[in-house]
Image (cartoon, rainbow, N blue to C red):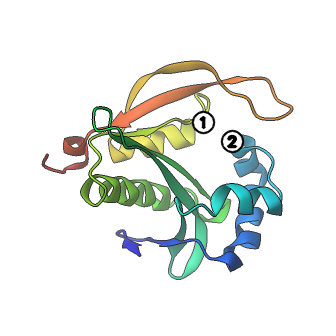
Amino acid sequence: MIEGDRIRLRPLRDDDAQALLEILTEPSVAEWWGTFDLERVRRELFDGCWFAVEESGRLAGLIGYSEEDDPEYRHAGIDVTLHPDFQNRGLGTDAVRTMARWLIEARGHVRITIDPAAGNARAIRCYERVGFKPVGVMRRYERLEGREPRDGLLMDLLPEELGHRP
């Protein structure tokens, strides 16, 4: 368990799959995440790098990370989404901040990246509140099935921008 100010991150459990599918098929989430079915949820999210985001014991969403372990380029990336009922309450900011802090302090990363769709203003505001800075636009970055390619915004965060002393 990783404790935030208002949320808790815990490893996914098998019995989370259906609830995660419900989150990922919400129209305002699917707009950014694409099409999921139960098979894809189990195949892509149950690899040990994804956590449930809980508020007061309720599943609010999920957050995951990826790592570059080459010591010359050591960094991690984050992905996150919340069910619409849990959005606009600061929980996403808390989840991203908590995950970033854990990746820096427990996993030893010296830079954290996040790459929202360039048009996802809500997500970008959330990441900026944590301290992420825009690095650049990645043109035609994302190709969700059945949709035109869209640009992504690469953002990064250094430990000192999170209030961590290197």
- The quarter of the picture where the N terminus appears is bottom left
- In the rendered image, residue 48, in percent from the top left (x then y), is placed at 54, 63
Label 2 residue SS: helix
Which comes before the other along the chain, label 1 or label 2?
Answer: 2
| Rendered image quadrant of residue 144 | top right
The residue located at (52%, 71%) in the rendering is 11
- State the residue in front, 137 or 124: 137
Residue type of the residue flagged with mark 2 = Trp
Work out which residue is located at the far bottom of the displayed protein and give it: 57
**Badge 1, how many Cα within 10 Å: few under 14, some, many 20+?**
few
- In the rendered image, residue 4, in percent from the top left (x then y), is placed at 36, 68
- In the rendered image, residue 8, in percent from the top left (x then y), is placed at 44, 73
Q: Which residue is mark 1?
A: 120
Residue type of the residue flagged with mark 1 = Asn
Q: Which residue is mark 2?
A: 32
Cβ–Cβ under 8 Å for marks 1 and 2 = yes
Question: Which circle marks residue 41 in the picture?
Answer: none
Label 1 residue SS: loop
| Rendered image quadrant of residue 99 | bottom left
